[in-house]
Image (cartoon, helix red, strand yellow):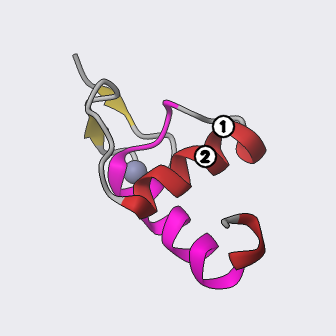
């Protein structure tokens, strides 16, 4: 079962486990701040998480 990413439109599998720290950070943000958890593909989560880790280190201990 695949889903279309609401950001880039790419088909992805929402059941796929996230392992990359940047993906997990992106997932955390999607849940806590953006309210779009499960709607973004792993690539978009990764870029979001990576940016957050670079510029918002205060959020991740
Ligand atoms: Zn995407």
User: Which SS does the magenta portion mostly show?
Assistant: helix
Please determine whether, in this image, residue 4 is positioned above or below residue 58: above
Residue at figure coordinates x 63%, y 44% from the top left? 30
Image-based side of 22 in relation to 58, left or right: left
> Which range is magenta?
38-56
Residue 25 in the image, given as x and y percentages of width and height: 54, 56
Residue 49 in the image, given as x and y percentages of width and height: 53, 64
The residue lying furthest to the bottom in this view is 54
Residue 8 seen in render: no
What residue sits right under mark 2 in the picture? 28
Please determine whether, in this image, residue 22 is positioned above or below residue 18: below
Residue at figure coordinates x 71%, y 35% from the top left? 35
Label 1 lies in ligand 1 vicinity (Cβ under 8 Å): no
Q: Which mark is residue 56?
A: none
> What is the C-alpha distance between the residues marked 1 and 2?
5 Å
User: Is the C-beta separation of discs 1 and 2 under 8 Å?
Assistant: yes
Residue 44 seen in render: yes
Q: Residues within 10 Å of mark 1 (few under 14, many from 20)?
A: few
Please determine whether, in this image, residue 17 is positioned above or below residue 49: above
Residue 15 in the image, given as x and y percentages of width and height: 30, 24
Residue 57 colored in magenta in the image = no
Residue at figure coordinates x 42%, y 55% from the top left? 23
Q: Residues within 10 Å of mark 2 (few under 14, many from 20)?
A: some
Q: Secondary structure at mark 1?
A: helix
What residue sits right under mark 1 in the picture? 31
- The quarter of the picture where the N terminus appears is top left
> Foreground residue, 25 or 30?
25
Q: Secondary structure at mark 2?
A: helix
Number of numbered markers: 2
Residue 51 in the image, given as x and y percentages of width and height: 57, 76
Q: Quadrant of residue 34?
A: top right
């Amino acid at each position: 079962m695949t889903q279309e990413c609401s950001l880039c439109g790419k088909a992805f599998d929402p059941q796929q486990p996230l392992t990359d720290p940047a993906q997990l950070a992106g997932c955390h943000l999607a849940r806590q701040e953006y309210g779009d958890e499960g709607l973004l593909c792993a690539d978009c989560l990764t870029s979001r998480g990576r940016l957050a880790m670079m510029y918002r280190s205060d959020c991740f201990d």
